[in-house]
Image (spheres, helix red, strand yellow):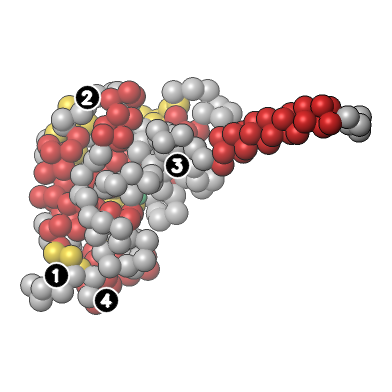
């Protein structure tokens, strides 16, 4: 109704200001996530052609999948022959990043049913991918924490594989981003290896790429390359440790 007295007009103006304030508050709440927002960055990554379904270990069949118990045993398959030092980096990350969580994370050369097998290759077909994971046909167990449909993110796989790709390192070394020859140009190889080891093992446990300043975030790879260059941290942050401790 149109106000027709000064008193009514003043009242309407107060009401308008109140509405404006309320609308502004709601808009601000919608536009800005809370400071402690916890994006959904835990669980298996979904791929239609995941190795879990088609029984192959090829690239593009990778599944970032969950383990299903606190024992986290890593075992070398053919490992450390292409990417110098990656085997040491993996063992250090197991003991330095993952064992301090609720997991009992360890290296083994005798367990025939480890949680993760490690390989390294020089795959020129994928020269921009430093590593990937899959749930291969040789897995010793797969399943879901919650039933499908909708439970794919809770998929777990025992006997996963992590493949590290030396071709990516050589490619980035050629661009001056990683120092593999002692030239002093680029991120020292052992530092990048530490990052890569922590990053990839996180995927096998269900950690997805996030925006926290640690090894799961590409931006903290410490390479002077767009998307990889916000900083350098080869370790987990409290955020990822919290996810692991909540799940395992
Ligand atoms: Zn990744």
Please name the residue shown 10% across and 76% down the image. Answer: 183
| Residue wearing tag 1 | 180
Distance of label 2 from label 4 (alpha carbons): 39 Å
Q: Secondary structure at mark 3?
A: loop
Q: Is mark 4 within 8 Å of ligand 1?
A: no
Mark 1–mark 2 CB contact (< 8 Å)? no
Mark 2–mark 4 CB contact (< 8 Å)? no
| Residue wearing tag 4 | 175
| Relative image position of residue 177 (x, y in whole percent) | 24, 70
Q: Is residue 16 visible?
A: yes
Please name the residue shown 56% across and 30% down the image. Answer: 150
Q: Is mark 3 within 8 Å of ligand 1?
A: no
Q: Secondary structure at mark 1?
A: loop
Please name the residue shown 18% across and 56% down the image. Answer: 193
Q: Which circle, 3 or 4, is nearer the viewer?
A: 4
Tell me if residue 26 comes above or below residue 31 in the rendering: above
């Amino acid at each position: 109704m149109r106000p027709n007295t000064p008193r009514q007009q003043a009242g309407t103006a107060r009401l308008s200001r109140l509405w404006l304030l309320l609308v502004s508050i709601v808009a601000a709440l919608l536009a800005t996530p809370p400071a402690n927002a916890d994006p959904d960055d835990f669980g298996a990554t979904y791929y239609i052609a995941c190795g879990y379904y088609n029984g192959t270990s090829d690239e593009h069949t990778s599944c970032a999948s969950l383990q299903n118990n606190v024992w986290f045993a890593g075992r070398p398959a053919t490992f450390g022959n292409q990417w110098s030092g990656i085997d040491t980096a993996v063992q250090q990350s197991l003991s330095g990043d993952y064992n301090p969580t609720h997991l009992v994370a360890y290296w083994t050369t005798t367990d025939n049913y480890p949680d993760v097998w490690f390989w390294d290759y020089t795959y020129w077909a994928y020269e921009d991918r430093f590593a990937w994971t899959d749930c291969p046909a040789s897995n010793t167990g797969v399943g879901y924490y919650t039933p499908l449909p909708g439970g794919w993110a809770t998929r777990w796989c025992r006997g996963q594989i992590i493949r590290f790709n030396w071709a990516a390192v050589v490619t980035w070394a050629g661009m001056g981003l990683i120092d593999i020859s002692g030239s002093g140009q680029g991120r020292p190889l052992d530092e990048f290896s530490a990052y890569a080891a922590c990053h990839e093992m996180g995927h096998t446990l269900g950690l997805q790429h996030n925006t926290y300043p640690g090894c799961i975030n590409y931006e903290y790879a410490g390479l002077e390359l767009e998307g990889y260059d916000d900083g350098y941290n080869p370790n987990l942050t409290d955020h990822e440790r919290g996810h692991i401790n909540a799940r395992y």
